[in-house]
Image: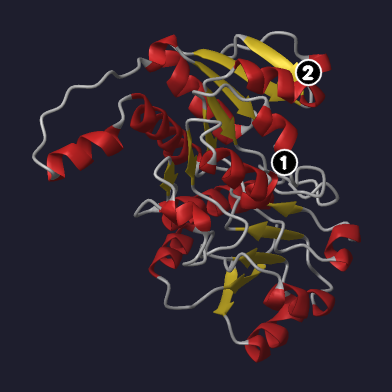
C-alpha cells in the first residue's frame, strides 16, 4: 500500500503521541486541534485518529475527508463521537475496547472487598483510635452477576472466579453459546432481573446506547438482595440514578461503588456525596498512568493491520453505538 495520510485530532504536544513513531515511515501525519488546520488536511486524509472523545472536530472535518477509509477512537466509548453522516457512511470505525479491562476488573474486586471487609468502618475506627471488633464477609462465598459480559465484564468475572466467587452473566448472544469458560451460568438480557436477584455483587459494564439507557432500573434495583452491592464501570445513564439513590438512602441495598455518573463531574450538591454506603470514584478507575500510551499502541497495531490488508480489530457497530 502506498503512503497514507493520517489526521490526528489531538494536542500536538501530548506526550502519549510519541507512540506514533512506531508507524510505518511512509505514513504522513498531521496532528492538531485547530479546526482550520484540520480542515486543510482533511481532503488528503486516509485515516483519522480521534483522541478527543467528542464529535466536534470530527464532524467538522468529516465532509471534507473524501478519501477517508477508516476512523479510530482512542476511547472505548463512542456514543459522544457519532453523528448521522458518520453512522450512515461506509467508513469503518474502531475503538479502544479492551485497553481498560484489566484496571476496571481490578476496581470491581476492590469494591467487593471494600464492602465485604467494611474498610470504611476500619478507617473510621482508626481515625477515632477505637478498638471495636465487627464481623466481615468472605467474597469467596458470594455470587457476582454481570450485566454486560464484554471485555470489562469478563475481566471482572475472571478475577472473581479466581477468588472463589460464583459467576453469573447476561449475554445478548446466549442462543449461540450455552457454556462459558468463566461464567457458571449465562442469562439472556431480558432475564437480567432473575440474575440480579441471585447476586451479591452486581457489576454493570454495558456501553451506553439507546437500548442500554436505564437497563438497570427501579425494578432491577428493587429485586436486589438487601445485602448486595452494585458496581458501575460502564456509563452512568445505564443505571436509573434516581432509583439507585432512593434504594441507597433507604438502605434497601448494602451499597454502591460508582465510577461513572449521569452528570460528570458529579455536582457538589448531589445526594450521592453524603451517603455512607457509596464509594465514589471520579471516573478514574481506568485512569492508569499509561492508558493513553496503551490506547495509542493499540491504534498503531491496527494501523499496521490496515496497511497489510488484514481485518481491523475492534470494529464498532455504528448503528448500535458500540
In this view, 7 is above or below 108: below
- Badge 2 crowding class, 10 Å Cα cut-off, few under 14, some 14 to 19, many 20 or more, is few
Is residue 205 visible in the rendered image? The answer is: yes
Location of residue 63 (image quadrant): bottom right
Give the SS element for disc 2.
Answer: helix
Give the distance between the C-alpha atoms of the residues marked 2 and 1, in whole angstroms: 25 Å
Q: Position of residue 97 (x, y in %)?
A: 60, 44
User: Which label's residue is closer to the chain start, 2 or 1?
Assistant: 2
Q: Position of residue 76 (x, y in %)?
A: 61, 50
- Badge 1 crowding class, 10 Å Cα cut-off, few under 14, some 14 to 19, many 20 or more, is few
- Furthest toward the right, the residue is 88
Identify the residue position indicated by label 1 in the image: 311
**In the displayed structure image, the side of residue 266 where residue 184 appears, left or right:** right
**In the displayed structure image, the side of residue 178 where residue 272 appears, left or right:** left
Q: In the depicted view, which residue is nearer to us: 35 or 193?
A: 193
Give the SS element for disc 1.
Answer: loop
Q: Nearer the viewer, mark 2 or mark 1?
A: 2
Identify the residue position indicated by label 2 in the image: 174
Is residue 148 visible in the rendered image? The answer is: no
Q: Position of residue 213 (x, y in %)?
A: 75, 47
Q: In the depicted view, which residue is nearer to us: 284 or 276?
A: 276
Q: Position of residue 122 (x, y in %)?
A: 21, 34
Residue sitting at 52 percent across and 20 percent down?
Answer: 200
Q: Which mark is residue 138?
A: none
Residue sitting at 76 percent across and 42 percent down?
Answer: 212
Residue sitting at 46 percent across and 57 percent down?
Answer: 22
In this view, 173 is above or below 251: above
Amino acid at each position: 500500500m502506498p503512503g497514507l495520510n493520517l489526521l490526528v485530532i489531538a494536542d500536538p504536544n501530548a506526550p502519549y503521541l510519541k507512540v506514533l513513531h512506531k508507524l510505518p515511515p511512509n505514513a504522513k501525519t498531521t496532528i492538531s486541534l485547530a479546526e482550520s488546520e484540520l480542515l486543510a488536511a482533511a481532503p488528503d486524509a486516509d485515516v483519522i485518529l480521534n483522541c478527543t472523545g467528542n464529535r466536534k472536530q470530527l464532524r467538522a472535518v468529516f465532509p471534507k475527508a473524501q478519501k477517508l477509509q477508516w476512523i479510530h477512537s482512542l476511547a472505548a466509548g463512542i456514543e459522544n463521537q457519532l453523528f448521522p453522516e458518520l453512522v450512515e457512511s461506509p467508513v469503518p470505525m474502531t475503538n479502544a475496547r479492551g485497553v481498560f479491562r484489566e484496571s476496571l476488573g481490578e476496581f470491581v474486586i476492590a469494591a467487593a472487598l471494600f464492602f465485604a471487609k467494611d474498610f470504611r468502618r476500619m478507617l473510621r475506627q482508626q481515625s477515632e483510635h477505637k478498638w471495636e471488633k465487627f464481623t466481615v464477609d468472605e467474597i469467596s462465598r458470594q455470587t457476582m452477576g454481570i450485566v454486560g459480559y464484554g471485555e470489562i465484564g469478563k475481566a471482572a468475572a475472571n478475577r472473581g472466579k479466581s477468588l472463589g466467587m460464583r459467576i453469573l452473566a447476561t449475554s445478548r448472544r446466549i442462543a449461540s453459546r450455552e457454556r462459558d469458560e468463566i461464567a457458571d451460568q449465562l442469562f439472556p438480557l431480558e432475564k437480567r432481573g432473575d440474575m440480579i436477584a441471585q447476586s451479591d455483587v452486581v457489576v454493570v459494564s454495558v456501553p451506553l446506547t439507546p437500548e442500554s439507557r436505564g437497563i438497570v432500573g427501579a425494578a432491577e434495583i428493587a429485586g436486589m438482595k438487601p445485602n448486595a452491592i452494585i458496581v458501575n464501570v460502564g456509563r452512568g445513564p445505564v443505571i436509573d440514578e434516581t432509583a439507585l439513590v432512593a434504594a441507597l438512602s433507604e438502605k434497601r441495598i448494602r451499597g454502591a461503588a460508582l465510577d461513572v455518573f449521569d452528570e460528570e463531574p458529579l455536582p457538589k450538591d448531589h445526594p450521592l456525596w453524603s451517603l455512607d454506603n457509596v464509594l465514589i470514584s471520579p471516573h478514574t478507575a481506568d485512569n492508569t498512568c499509561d492508558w493513553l500510551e496503551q490506547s495509542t499502541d493499540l491504534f498503531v497495531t491496527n494501523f499496521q493491520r490496515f496497511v497489510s490488508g488484514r481485518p481491523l480489530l475492534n470494529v464498532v457497530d455504528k448503528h448500535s453505538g458500540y
